[in-house]
Image (cartoon, rainbow, N blue to C red):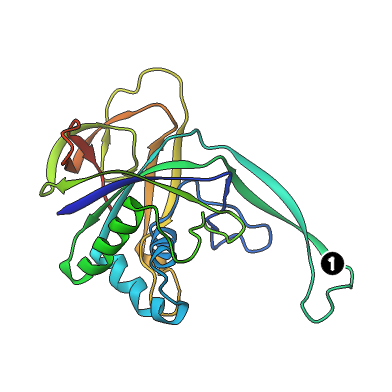
Amino acid sequence: MKGIQFIIEGNWGHFKKPETNNNPLSHDLITKTALIGLIGAVLGIEREAMKDKFPELSEDLLYGVRLLNPVKKISWGFTSKTAINPTNGGSPKYFEFLKDPKFLVSLALHENRSQNIFDNFSKAILQEESIYPPVLGWHNCPANLEWKSEGNFSEIKDGPLETQGFVLAGEYTLQNISGEFRIGFDKMPTYQNNDFWNLPDRYKNIIYPDYPHSISVEGKYYEYVPANGDEIEKWVLI
């Protein structure tokens, strides 16, 4: 599979957990559906056109995430007001934000149906171009994108691997974990339909090591072979 790697970072990020509407909490990592939205912004795809792109790209692309900064969360309070009476008093509402999020993302083209979008997105990152500003979940959380490499992902393999990225809970056997560091758990959306709805049965439970640590597991993985000759890496992709 064709693949690329790039860095996403910003001062703030918020990837809303759907079960926390009153005081929204954030996923720890950029989700697959948020990444697809970011791809649409970079390429200038209008919202109505993205309705059909979300299910296609959810199926056609695979992604993995590695932390480049520790996960740090901060809650901020806002006063919620209505557009009809914006001068009226509002009720306070708290939102959880990621502080200084920075991710290394691996993106693979799983189905050739989306090759044009994949190629155009790769070119845009390499040339540092974007039609609409990319964001880390919210429009008031701008994102910076930095090209890292292009390469190829192998066919899926099975065996031991050491990774700084996420793995799927319940599908990988954790090996010895040495040292004291945080192991994170999250439930991530991987598929959005053409009504902009993240299907509940397509969520995946993940485990990840906090930066800069790694975990040793055994299970299915892909090898990423970068074209620039950098070291071959093992990744779990969803």
Give residue 57's position: percent from left, percent from top: 30, 67
Mark 1 residue type: Gly
Q: In this view, does 124 lie to the left or right of 81?
A: left
What residue is disc 1 on?
Answer: 90
Q: Looking at the image, which residue is at 54% across and 58% down?
A: 17
Toward the right, the furthest residue is: 88
Give residue 95's position: percent from left, percent from top: 67, 54
Look at the picture and state if 21 lies above or below 212.
Answer: below
Q: Is residue 173 left or right of residue 227?
A: right
Q: Looking at the picture, tell me which residue is in the foreground, 67 or 93.
A: 67
Q: Is residue 89 left or right of residue 202?
A: right
Q: Looking at the picture, tell me which residue is in the foreground, 151 or 93.
A: 151
Residue 1 position by quadrant: bottom left
Give residue 150's position: percent from left, percent from top: 22, 46
- Which secondary structure lies at badge 1? loop
Look at the picture and state if 8 lies above or below 184.
Answer: below
Q: Looking at the image, which residue is at 43% across and 68% down?
A: 198
Give residue 48's position: percent from left, percent from top: 44, 82
Mark 1 surroundings within 10 Å by alpha-carbon count, few (fewer than 14), some (14 through 19), many (20 or more): few
